Amino acid sequence: MQEKDLIKFIKGDASPDEKKIVIEWIKKDSEHQKQFNLLKAEYVASTLDSLSNMDVNAPYQRFSSKRIKKKRYYYTAIAASIVVPFMMWYMFTSFPGNDSVVDTTEILNSTTKHVATSHGGYKTVVLPDGSTIVLNANSSLTYPNRFTDSIRKVTLVGEAFFDIKRDVTKPFIVTTDHINIRVLGTSFNVKSYPKDEKVETTLVTGKVEVFQQQKEEPIVLEPSQRAIFDKEKSDIKVDRVDSKNIVAWQEGKLIFDKTPLKQVVLDLNRKYNVEFTIKSDSLLQYKYTGEFDNLTLKEVLELIKMSSPINYKYVNNKVMLNSE
């Protein structure tokens, strides 16, 4: 692997395919991992003085010239003493925009990793076992640096699509505030936002077991089945859905099928970072059906207005929804 390709990855300029190639190269050999870690630490140290206004070409120019003049161990010392406070900031800004791939290599010998997304964004995370997780907006994922136990366990807040590598010797466990999901190898979607009234698990392929906390018997899902945990009632119901619609958010789509308006505005808030207020009591019971395919907020609101008895207006940077 050429050093310029690694620098391109570190700077966040690599394409999705190039990112995957670098990640596979890092995972292939521990020496590759060490080489990458050192190179990344050196690069961060060499660019700390211009983090707030970084020129596209200048960082690598400075980085290359400094490496000629100084030894690697000098940069390692700088990284160890300076980079730590900025590392979490750096990891989430090194790969800007949607569909960024977060590498899981060990940089500062941390035992756990934490990845988070903001409004309107999502990230693709490649786990140490090769499994892939796509985080939706306003979500976070916590997982170990290495899966060394008899299980592969991660913690999710928010929504994510999981594509899990099969390993019959190490079941994969997703923990949320209310339910746990156990799989051996499969693909599924979990939606578990703190503000939502329900937690949803939708199976795309394979098989999953959904455990309600403090209950031993799991609910086993088949493809295109969804387990819905009601937080208030503390029970789980299973229905059949079109799984393609459930995971369409990865393509920038929002698809609602007789969805309570309260849930619709929560999803819109996460995507567009705009606060909604429902001013009509009758709308609190209204269920909306519609599809928004990569639309702007203005287009979404106009479509809602045309396809439902809902009107809207902006007040102090908030969207107020009323009955027509």
Image: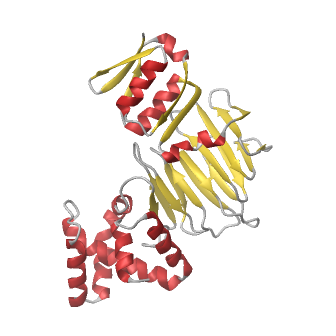
Relative height, residue 94 to residue 307 (above, below):
below
Q: Is residue 210 left or right of residue 135?
A: right
| Residue at the image point whose x is 68% and y is 58% from the top | 172
Please identify the quarter of the rendering in which residue 63 is found: bottom left
Q: Is residue 251 visible?
A: yes
| Residue at the image point whose x is 35% and y is 72% from the top | 8
Q: Is residue 207 left or right of residue 289?
A: right
Q: Position of residue 316 (x, y in %)?
A: 26, 24
Relative height, residue 318 to residue 309 (above, below):
below
Q: Is residue 60 left or right of residue 220?
A: left
Q: Position of residue 189 (x, y in %)?
A: 62, 46
Give the total number of marks visible in the rendering: 0
Q: Position of residue 87 (x, y in %)?
A: 35, 65
Please identify the quarter of the rendering in which residue 218 is found: top right
| Residue at the image point whose x is 69% and y is 38% from the top | 226
Relative height, residue 3 to residue 148 (above, below):
below
User: Looking at the image, which is closer to me, 190 or 214?
Assistant: 190
In which quadrant is the C terminus drawn?
A: top left
